[in-house]
Amino acid sequence: MSELLVKTASRVTTITLNRPDARNAMSRDMWLGLVDLLHDAQNDPDVGCVVLTGADPAFCAGGDVKSMVDRAKNGFSNTVEEDAAFVRRIMESARLLHEMPKPAIAAINGACAGAGFSLAMACDLRIAKEAAKMTTAFANVGGSGDFGGSWFLSKIVGTAKARELYYTAKIIDGREAEAMGVVNHAYSDEEFNQSVDELADRLANGPSVALGYMKKNMNLAEQGTLAQALDQEALHMMLSFRTDDHIEAAKAFVEKRKPNFKGR
């Protein structure tokens, strides 16, 4: 059974972490495979949106704690620098989710912890089940955190709340996460799948070039200056105006109809 499932339909690529017996905790091969899949999605012109989710009943429990125990028992075979180099390699997954020029959605269908929580934070949008349980978890296993979670969460909810969630490893459900701004929306079990599908379809079949520029603008806004943002917005807006999608949208507006975007 493959530990990573990928399906592309109607310009939406859905990547499912598929290790349900371990709450989709990530193995070494899963981490490496996820990076490859995200590279493929980033470079595929027929993909307009990426959805990251997990096989029920969990989203992702993070790293494999059992392998951590084995490593501790058997001793560390690599130096700190060698292990850190590998982690930097697989943390490319978080960078790709955050920076690829197309929207990424985390569909949080269940338990979401540790590095799994970090991956969700790396996505542009997060949709959760109301009953989904989320936690940074790192303090519970004596770790400091990885996959950019501390950076992403601080941007999403502010430094004080991010520190609280990291230091205490507090568990929050989907409704609490929505109220906090950790997720965009929380839905009942019955509403969840349809809501994710509708959002992904809308984004994947929208003006893809313009959405890619929007994402770059938003990323710059997280740490750049107003002057940098104004300069980049001017360039991206004029590039957007030269796309077929803009011309189609302008015609549709005048003709009072829904635009038919082609992603170019």
Image (tube, rainbow, N blue to C red):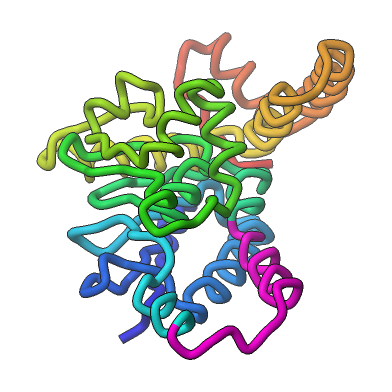
In percent of width and height, residue 251 lies at: 61, 18
Q: Quadrant of residue 116?
A: bottom left
In percent of width and height, residue 123 lies at: 51, 42
**Prevailing secondary structure of the magenta residues:** helix
Q: Is residue 217 left or right of residue 202?
A: right
Residue 245, above or below 140: above
Q: Quadrant of residue 27?
A: bottom left
Residue 87 part of the magenta segment: yes
Residue 171 part of the magenta segment: no
Q: Is residue 251 left or right of residue 107?
A: right
In percent of width and height, residue 228 lies at: 87, 19
Q: Is residue 16 left or right of residue 206?
A: left
| The residue positioned farthest toward the left in the image shown | 190
State which region is magenta. 73-93
Q: 146 or 264: which is nearer to us?
A: 146
Q: Residue, x 59% and y 41% (percent of image)?
A: 262
- Across the whole image, how many numbered discs are drawn on residues? 0
In percent of width and height, residue 239 lies at: 82, 28
Q: What quarter of the picture does the C terminus occupy?
A: top right
Residue 186, above or below 228: below
Q: Residue, x 25% and y 26% (percent of image)?
A: 176
Q: Residue, x 60% and y 33% (percent of image)?
A: 207
Residue 12, above or below 28: above
Q: 233 or 206: which is nearer to us?
A: 233
